[in-house]
Amino acid sequence: MSFVVVENVGKEYGEGGPAVRVLEGISFGLREGEFAALMGPSGSGKSTLLTVVGAMNRPTEGRVVVDGIDVYALSEERRADFRREYLGFVFQQHHLMPYLTALENVMLPLAPLPLRAREKGARAGAALARVGLAGKESRLPGQLSGGEQGRLAIARAVVNDPPLLLADEPTGALDSRTGAEVMGVLRALNAAGQTVLLVTHNPENAALAHRVLHIQDGNALSVFAPEALAPAREATSFETLSQVGG
Amino acid sequence: MRISTIAWANLRRRKARALFLVAGIAIGIATAVALLSLSRMISEEIGLQLDQYGANIVVVPKSDQLALDYGGVAVSGVSFDVGQLTDEDVGRIREIPYSARLSAVAPKVLGAVEAEGRRVLLAGVDFESEFALNRWWRLVGRKPEAEGELVAGYDAARALGLIAPSDADESFPVVREFAASVDHTAMSAHAHHAMMERHFRLARASVTVGGREFKLAAVLAPTGGREDSMLFGRLGEAQALLKRPGQVSVVEVSALCKDCPVEDIVGQIAQKLPNAKVSALQQAVRARTETVGRLTRFAYAVSAVVLLIGALLIFTTVTGSVVERTKEIGVMRAVGFRRSHIFRGLMLEVLAVSALGGLLGWAAGALAARLMLPYFSQTGIGFDADPRLAALSVLAALAVGAAASWYPTRRASRLDPAEAVRHV
């Protein structure tokens, strides 16, 4: 049984103006511990789909069920609790708080929790250690390299031990070396049992996944094995990948 | 880490914006504090001044007979010869619980006497109390010091031939010792002006009243009041002359009612003297209340406008700050902050800044009021910082801060996290 079930999801924008349909009839599932890559051309609706799965963006139709919980049947505040308990987000630009130290940034999702400061610190410290940033707790994000910032963003996403990690092009703003560094961390987390849904343009990154979900124009979702990405990896061209996805 | 940690960190990060907000709130609160402090101090000053002028309570014997007007005050009895109050009653007035608030208790026995062949109203008084009560009186001559001395009102003195116009180069000593405390008041200026216009000198050293010769100690400069047509002697001597030993016709009381309702004092005197009719002269009290009320209303109105401007400043600053932090708020929502957490965090920042602004505003306002008071005060009343105003200032700043930032803060807490994260 799938841990995440996306069922006939559609999304339309444009309240009060001409409606723009971004997603239509999207359905797929993710098993617990699976690493899936979501690919597609720009404007195909990848990021929108990620936010829909991430309980942040109510779909116009369809539903999202995570661990048996119909996410959008929850109230707004309960959905915030759900995000804190079940989900970890890694954003393309990392979106770290520049005025908080690395440790404080990682502690951010713990701030609303009624835990002792020591426990929060210990959890955040452990998360930093998992991504190889032990000893850099007191650094501000601006004092870290791009790769370190990416890893810091991952540490923040996993500090709550969420069952599902959602990453939106976490290497998009990084060079290939630091991007590989970040992907290494994601892969290691997955190897430890973390379910990951990764939005990426990069076939190299997608090749690390168990499955590749390819979305086209918001309505055609095809699923294939990463091995099918070989031609695209060689060409590093998205057009080629689109042809593979058919 | 708590939500408050993020709030403090954010304030530290945006020091200039925080200081700008603190300054805006502090200026608003300082203006309000300065105005209200000045208004309060001036109100107190006016209260003290009005309390010092004349009687505000009159005690007369109870009577079923027709009332006779006495200088605008209803005095019981068709005749001044009706006297049911006694010297002991005067003593009882001084024993009321609010006795400390009685600045003057001036008993009088009133009666018509023959003086220099003319009928004239004689008032037997306690001169010390009378001068304390009527601080605007000016004497041409000297203060009565011994038995057998009189003071004549200006009209009475003129009618009895006791004064003559002053020579141009001749001047008479004016007793100023009773004027010292009221030199700056409008009333003393008026009396002084009147006196300067009508110079006169004593033409006689003595006057015969009721067949007895009295020394003429002084003549009152014209006041325009009832005392102009009266003679004033010592209470005991007048009682003897009028054959009413130990009796008192009326007791005029000056009560310092700044902090207490005059009705309370009236009630206490009435309780002590069940056979007397005790009346409060409401005009003075009402005039004071009205003056003080106008000042206070003005201070409140200006304070409200300034605080409104402060509120608009907070509104625009917080709105700008929220827009600037849209992405940050989106991230917090994405990682599991509830709307209420966002609201609480933002509000905490505003309230911290408001509290600091309120405190600084109070200090600045109190200092400004202290520095400005000499320019507004007529008597050089000392500034007295009200510690309750400090608490009120902080509370007002918090209320203004909370009210002004409520809308942008609530809007921020309701941002769609997916949209907010994408915000550029």
Image (cartoon, rainbow, N blue to C red):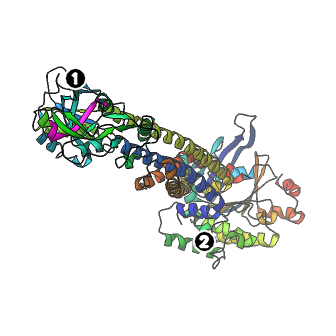
Q: Position of residue B145 (x, y in %)?
A: 24, 48
Query: Residue B181's spot in the image, x, y percent?
Result: 38, 49
Relative vertical location of residue A68 with respect to residue B140 in this rendering, above or below: below
User: Dot 1: few (<14), some (14–19), or many (≥20) neighbours within 10 Å?
Assistant: some
Towards the viewer: B152 or A103: B152
B96 and A3: which is toward the camera: B96
Q: Chain of mark 2?
A: A
Tell me, yes or no, if residue A111 can be seen here: no
* View extreme (bottom): residue: A135
- Amino acid on which disc 2 is placed: Leu
Along the line of sight, which residue is nearer the eye, A142 or B307?
B307
Q: Residue at x 54, y 49 (%)?
A: B31
Task: Give the quarter of the image for residue B86.
Answer: top left
Q: Start and end of the magenta stretch?
A: B228-238
Q: Is residue B340 left or right of residue B160?
A: right
Q: CA distance from mark 2 to mark 1?
A: 91 Å
Q: Which residue is mark 2?
A: A103
Q: Nearer the viewer, mark 2 or mark 1?
A: 1
Which residue, as the protein is rendered here, is positioned at the far right?
A: A235
The label shown at residue B68 is: 1
Mark 2: secondary structure: helix
Horizontal arrangement in the rendering, residue B286 relative to residue B23 (left or right): left
Mark 2 surroundings: few (<14), some (14-19) or many (≥20) residues within 10 A: many
Classify residue B91 as left or right of residue B129. left
Examine the image and state in which quarter residue A123 appears. Answer: bottom right
Q: Position of residue A218 (x, y in %)?
A: 76, 46
At label 1, which amino acid type do we have? Leu
Q: Could you tell whether B249 is left or right of A64 in the image? A: left
Please determine whether, in this image, residue A156 is positioned above or below residue B225: below
B291 inside magenta stretch: no
Residue positioned 29% across, 28% down in the render: B71
Q: Chain of mark 1?
A: B
